[in-house]
Amino acid sequence: MDDKFMLAALAQSRKALPECLPNPPVGCVIVHSGQIVAVGYTHSPGKHHAEADALTHIQGQDLQFLQIYVTLEPCSFQGRTPSCALAIAKDPRIQEIYVSIVDPEPRNKGKGLDILKQAGKTVHVGLCADKVNAFLQKYLLQG
């Protein structure tokens, strides 16, 4: 676990604005052997969320034992885009997920974390939560 990777994900979050709105500006980094191998952020509605954006950058690469650092819990439901939690759950290369804050959106609210845990992933919640929450709070839908 490393704060610098979550802070890198937070820096990606800032790149999402303003095009991601009304979706929250989420950032994601994928780490292999202590090195960032992909980054992503949420694009305009109907386009890639942060996790899907980052995953596109490692397609076809023979990387194993990856960690994902994401500022907000991956979405558990399909809206205009597929569920990010399901995409991560289905990728056997990804072993560990670091989520800074749980999404308070009623359709999510821990369900994304449950999908990841049921898929056998190691899930950590709360890394850099104060800094991430300070940035993201005003963009989150409360239940």
Image: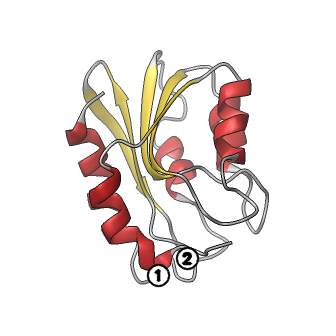
Q: Residue at x 78, y 66 (%)?
A: 79
Q: Residue at x 61, y 68 (%)?
A: 47
Q: Residue at x 62, y 20 (%)?
A: 92
The kind of residue tagged 2 is: Ser
Q: Position of residue 45 (x, y in %)?
A: 62, 76
Q: CA distance from mark 2 to mark 1?
A: 5 Å
Circle 2/circle 1 CB separation < 8 Å: yes
Outermost residue to the right: 78
The kind of residue tagged 1 is: Glu
Q: Quadrant of the N terminus?
A: top left
Write down the quadrant of residue 143 in the picture: bottom right
Q: Position of residue 59 (x, y in %)?
A: 54, 35
* Above or below 111: residue 120: above
* Above or below 59: residue 138: below
Q: Position of residue 61 (x, y in %)?
A: 48, 26
**Could you tell me how many numbered marks the image carries?**
2
Outermost residue to the left: 4
Write down the quadrant of residue 3 in the picture: top left
Q: Residue at x 51, y 71 (%)?
A: 24
Q: Position of residue 93 (x, y in %)?
A: 55, 20
- Horizontal side, residue 24 vs residue 136: left or right: right
- Rate crowding at label 2 as few (under 14), some (14 to 19) or many (20 or more) other CA atoms within 10 Å: some
Residue that label 1 marks: 19
Q: Secondary structure at mark 1?
A: loop
Considering only order in the chain, which callout, 1 or 2, is on the residue closer to the N terminus? 1
- Horizontal side, residue 54 vs residue 87: left or right: left
* Above or below 70: residue 32: above
Q: Secondary structure at mark 2?
A: loop
Residue that label 2 marks: 44
From the viewer's side, name the closer residue of 142 and 73.
142
